[in-house]
Image (spheres, rainbow, N blue to C red):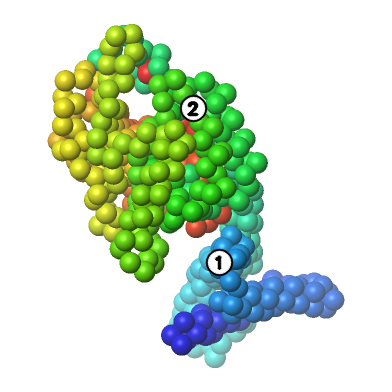
Amino acid sequence: MRSWKVIWVVIVLVILLDLYIFQVIKAVSQGTSSRVRLTIFALYWGLSVAALIIFALLPFLNAQEWPKLKNYIFVTLLVFFFAKLLAAVFFLIDDIRRFIQWASGKLFFNNTDGSADGEEISRSAFLSWLGLGVGGAFFSTLIYGFSNKYKYEVRRVTLHFDNLPASFRGLKIVQLSDIHSGSLGDRQAVNRGVDKVLQEQPDLILFTGDLVNDIAAEMKDYKEVFGRLKAPMGVFSTLGNHDYGDYYWWETPALKKANLDRLKQIQADMGWRLLVNEHVALEKGGEQIALIGIENWSAKARFPKYGKMSEAYAGAEKYPFKILMSHDPSHWDAEIRPHYPDIDLALAGHTHGMQFGIEIPGIKWSPVQYVYKQWAGLYEEGRQKLYVNRGFGFIGYPGRVGIMPEITVIELA
């Protein structure tokens, strides 16, 4: 019952927003013929009414049978709504301007319509068209972003460390993160992404968490695909916040635990070595470095702190160089840098770069930067370095705008 009340409230608010925007559409289309105006009006209300009907019918779409379709529909409707809301901001600015001009006319010129010369205060054509343009561009851009979710981008970075043992200079590492297999729907495209990794012929592959969205069963169609990942020094992984099933309703704690155990077994079956609050020694040319992997640990209150650095680090002091895999980048500033200054390189993921932003020479921006200080790419403080992978998969919004899915190739020097 409560959900239907929410739906009706949303429908009423959307209708009010549509009526408000329609006043602007009527104003900007005044100079066109009656046939053109009728076509514009029919298109606007046709799309708006169709969106409302689809929104009202969404609860009846079986999410178990059509989870990805339902997600696409919901996201499209959400983008459509926010595009209108964004456009309405410009119209509201114009209406505030008109109100101030009207009030000034009433106060200083005593005109009945509030204007200085007795004429009606018209809408700003510039602000009206700007609002429509910005709203339309926002909608078009996010819909176009649906096509970018499998456009895997190989990013290369060479990292220099004075204390790196000579045998490890030139070591090639591929970092992957945030596969989110429950969101994936194109096995062939994902295979092409795995091919890109294998073409790099890395010495070592490191996966920094979020293999699934919620449940281990999401790997059914992709276990074989990601099982193809092989490297001479091995494939190592750690857990992300989504891997624990915390966002899924379980009938009993035992079922939740069994799901996590199943996910761990899947990684073992693929030949991945999952590091759970532990470290291993990597050997090359008679020299060794430490690879540390911990469970999810976040400085953000709404994410859990399963990781135990004291356990993972214990015994690693003796190695001259240390790499840490920790899913959430907020861990770096909160615990790693203050308490573990000899961890040379930390690898994280989690943010996805919000799957939306701008990355061009001279400009690097995403809304996620207002939540996470380190959100994509390389960060350095003193002798310590952090690399945040932008994610291989996606969740929520089934697309990418400006922040492409990433395969990171790191060369140690």
Residue 288: give x, y in percent of width and height: 27, 16
Q: In which quarter of the image is residue 127?
A: bottom right
Q: What residue type is labelled 1?
A: Gln
Q: Which amino acid does label 2 sit on?
A: Lys
Q: Can residue 78 be seen in this view?
A: yes
Q: In which quarter of the image is the C terminus?
A: top left
Residue drawn at (40%, 63%), measured in percent from left and top? 248
* Number of marks in picture: 2
Q: In which quarter of the image is residue 41?
A: bottom right
Circle 2 — which element? loop
Q: In this view, does 369 lie to the left or right of 155?
A: left
- Is 349 located above or below residue 57 in the figure? above
- Is 218 located above or below residue 189 in the figure? below
Q: Distance between the residues labelled 1 and 2?
A: 33 Å
Q: Which mark is residue 64?
A: 1
Q: Mark 2 points at which residue?
A: 230
Residue drawn at (15%, 32%), measured in percent from left and top? 314
Q: Earlier in the sequence, mark 1 or mark 2?
A: 1
Q: Is residue 402 visible?
A: no
Q: Residue 362 carries which label?
A: none
